[in-house]
Image: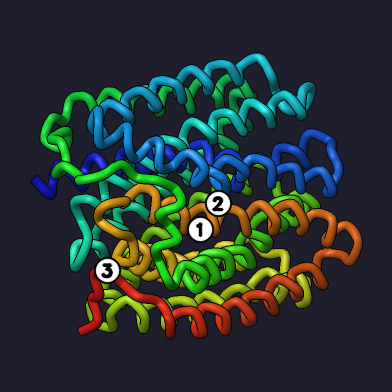
């Protein structure tokens, strides 16, 4: 049964990664290449709003999954995602930036809703020692989706324009729906839960504040750097296709880091120490963009090497952090608890992505990258402090 469950999780996370990749790894470059200013890159932060606030409807989706089954909720949201993607055909960002961003926000809202069901499915079936492999699949699948939705769509846009890229996006979402429908093994209902899930039940976690501290702190510096790198590369003369290839290489490195380093860290060190080790590596590697700017390095191979190493370290960190939160979530409210932590991360991403464009415009790239690197060091301290007080439902400490 685990094989079918893992395949389904991979397809779900790939689907949810596609619009996220478009938003965070393609849209900023498209905005700049379309003639809009660096400050308008901050509009990318709006696309993360559904991911940041999906906790508001997480308990309702959790209850629908308990009543109707996770599979039906996933199929419905997947079909809506295909429809939203097709609607984007009429609004290229060069001519209709505001409407295009609104459409991408709507697409991400649908996929964020599906993510609640996906989280609930994973937590209900794969807690404990299965959390490491499950979250490696989550990271690898989501990154594969972001790779296709970010770098892949940039390459497609360079060759076939906006309409061609959006048709590929809709086709990939439709293919995922079909493959999920054909694979019947994962569609068995989860064990019945005794009561309805309510959002306010999150307050039963006495360590909720510490969990939110970790969720808010760990990803924001990386998001700030990743958002600003895109217009930085455009201003350095790298075309959209070249940026697309770089983004794909970095995402592959991130997925590799999650599988090759993240899973062994969780298994050998346990949840808490794996998070500390993974985050220390990621915080150190976060200075890659500042070093390239300070040394005025412009060789393409250096971009691939520096950002690839950064992505590898971040992949290990992501697996460790989300395995931690999977084992923190209560089995009776799997989607709500896990989603609340994702929302903390995404709220910080909204603020980071929204602010970094203005900071880069005001201070220049070098100082903006330096500030983000310093924020990564502070985030490491916050994560280390919060881990001391976190209580796990399933602790994998050796």
Image quarter of residue 300: bottom right
Q: Is residue 151 visible?
A: no
Is 218 located above or below residue 196 in the figure?
A: below
> Which residue, given by chain and number where applicable, does mark 1 sit on?
250
The crowding category of the residue bearing disc 3, from other C-alpha atoms within 10 Å (few below 14, some 14 to 19, many at least 20), is some
Give the numbered dot on residue 384: none
Nearer to us: label 3 or label 2: 3
Image quarter of residue 8: top left
> Which residue, given by chain and number where applicable, does mark 3 sit on?
393
Asked whether 64 or 314 is in front, the reply is: 64
Q: Position of residue 222 (x, y in %)?
A: 60, 65
Is 255 located above or below residue 39 in the figure?
A: below
Q: Position of residue 196 (x, y in %)?
A: 31, 41
What residue is at 51 percent from the left and 38 percent from the top? 149
The single residue placed furthest to the left in the displayed view is 1
Q: Position of residue 375 (x, y in %)?
A: 68, 75
Is 321 located above or below residue 398 in the figure?
A: above
Cα gap from disc 1 to disc 3, whole angstroms: 33 Å
Image quarter of residue 392: bottom left
CB-based contact (under 8 Å), mark 1 and mark 2: yes
Cα gap from disc 3 to disc 2, whole angstroms: 36 Å
- Label 2 sits on a secondary structure element that is helix
> Which residue, given by chain and number where applicable, does mark 2 sit on?
247
What residue is at 24 percent from the left and 28 percent from the top? 68
Q: Quadrant of the N terminus?
A: top left
Asked whether 225 or 114 is in front, the reply is: 114
Q: Position of residue 280 (x, y in %)?
A: 50, 82
Give the left or right position of residue 398, taking residue 235 as reference: left
């Amino acid at each position: 049964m685990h094989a079918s469950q893992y395949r389904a999780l991979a397809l779900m996370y790939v689907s949810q990664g596609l619009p996220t990749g478009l938003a965070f790894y393609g849209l900023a470059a498209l905005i700049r290449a379309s003639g809009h200013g660096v400050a308008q890159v901050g509009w990318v932060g709006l696309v993360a709003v559904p991911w940041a606030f999906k906790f508001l409807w997480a308990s309702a989706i959790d209850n629908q999954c308990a009543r109707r089954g996770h599979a039906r909720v996933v199929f419905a949201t997947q079909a809506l995602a295909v429809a939203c993607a097709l609607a984007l055909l009429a609004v290229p960002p060069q001519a209709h930036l505001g409407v295009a961003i609104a459409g991408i926000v709507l697409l991400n809202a649908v996929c964020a809703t599906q993510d609640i069901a996906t989280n609930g499915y994973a937590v209900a079936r794969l807690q404990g020692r299965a959390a490491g492999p499950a979250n490696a699949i989550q990271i690898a699948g989501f990154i594969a989706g972001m790779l296709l939705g970010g770098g892949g769509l940039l390459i497609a846009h360079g060759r076939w324009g906006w309409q061609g890229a959006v048709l590929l996006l809709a086709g990939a979402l439709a293919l995922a729906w079909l493959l999920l429908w054909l694979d019947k093994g994962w569609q068995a209902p989860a064990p019945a839960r005794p009561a309805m899930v309510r959002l306010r039940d999150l307050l039963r976690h006495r360590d909720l504040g510490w969990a939110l501290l970790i969720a808010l702190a760990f990803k924001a510096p990386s998001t700030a750097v990743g958002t600003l790198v895109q217009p930085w590369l455009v201003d350095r003369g790298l075309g959209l296709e070249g940026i697309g290839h770089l983004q794909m290489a970095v995402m592959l490195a991130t997925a590799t880091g999650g599988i090759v380093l993240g899973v062994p860290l969780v298994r050998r060190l346990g949840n808490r120490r794996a998070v500390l080790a993974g985050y220390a590596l990621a915080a150190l590697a976060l200075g890659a963009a500042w070093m390239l700017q300070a040394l005025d390095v412009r060789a393409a191979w250096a971009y691939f090497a520096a950002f690839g190493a950064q992505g590898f370290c971040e992949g290990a960190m992501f697996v460790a952090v989300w395995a931690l939160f999977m084992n923190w979530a209560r089995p009776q409210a799997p989607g709500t608890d896990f989603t609340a932590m994702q929302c903390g991360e995404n709220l910080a991403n909204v603020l980071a992505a929204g602010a970094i464009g203005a900071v880069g415009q005001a201070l220049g790239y070098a100082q903006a990258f330096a500030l983000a690197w310093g924020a990564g060091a502070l985030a490491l301290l916050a994560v280390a402090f919060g881990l001391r007080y976190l209580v796990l439902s399933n602790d994998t400490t050796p």
